[in-house]
Amino acid sequence: MICKGRVGYKDLELLYSGYIDNDAIICSDNYKSYIQFGRDLKLDHKRIMRDHRKNGIHHINHINSLHSQFKKWMKKFNGVSTKFLANYIGLSGAMF
């Protein structure tokens, strides 16, 4: 688990440092942390603007679907303490 809430620039650096090739393409929503991260690494950044589903062939449907599946899976626990959130996330890996 990288953070609680919206991901920040420092969170992205921590998560992806050393794992992104120079010719990678970032596909994300229009959140400022992603914009700055892509700009600083001089990467091609395909932004999906609010209320749009895609930008050409690029989309974030897979991530949105994963979030939706995870939220459905979490409902059966009737609320989760953030203290144990990492444990639930670990369990969910076996479920998807």
Image (cartoon, helix red, strand yellow):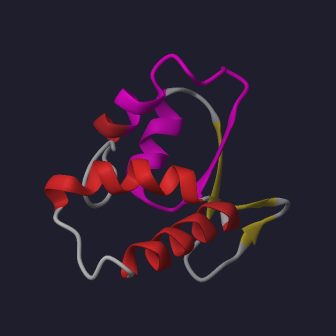
The location of residue 18, given as percent across then percent down, is 51, 16
Asked where in the image residue 95 lies, by quadrant, the reply is bottom right
Identify the residue at horizontal 56%, vertical 22% (top origin).
19
Pick whichever, 95 or 42, lies toward us: 95
Apparent side of residue 43 relative to residue 92 in the rendered image (left or right): right
Quadrant (top left, top right, bottom left, bottom right) of the C terminus: bottom right
In this rendering, position of residue 64 left or right of residue 4: right
Image quadrant containing the N terminus: top left
The image shows residue 94, relative to residue 79, as above or below, that is above
Give percent across and percent down for residue 15.
41, 32
User: Which residue of the protein is positioned furthest toward the top in this rendering?
Assistant: 18
Q: Residue at x 51, y 36 (%)?
A: 39
In the picture as drawn, the residue positioned furthest to the right comes out as 57
Would you say 82 lies left or right of 20 here?
A: left
Q: Is residue 93 magenta?
A: no
Where is residue 64 drawn, in percent x and y? 59, 69
Horizontal relation, residue 24 to residue 90: left or right: right
Q: Residue at x 31, y 59 (%)?
A: 6
Examine the rendered structure and indicate whether residue 91 appears above or below residue 60: above
Q: Nearer the viewer, residue 52 or 84?
A: 84
Number of numbered callouts drawn: 0
State yes or no: residue 38 in magenta: yes
The magenta segment is 12-40
Can you say whether 62 is above or below 16 in the image? below
Residue nearer the viewer, 56 or 10: 10
Q: Residue at x 73, y 25 (%)?
A: 23
Q: Quadrant of residue 28?
A: bottom right
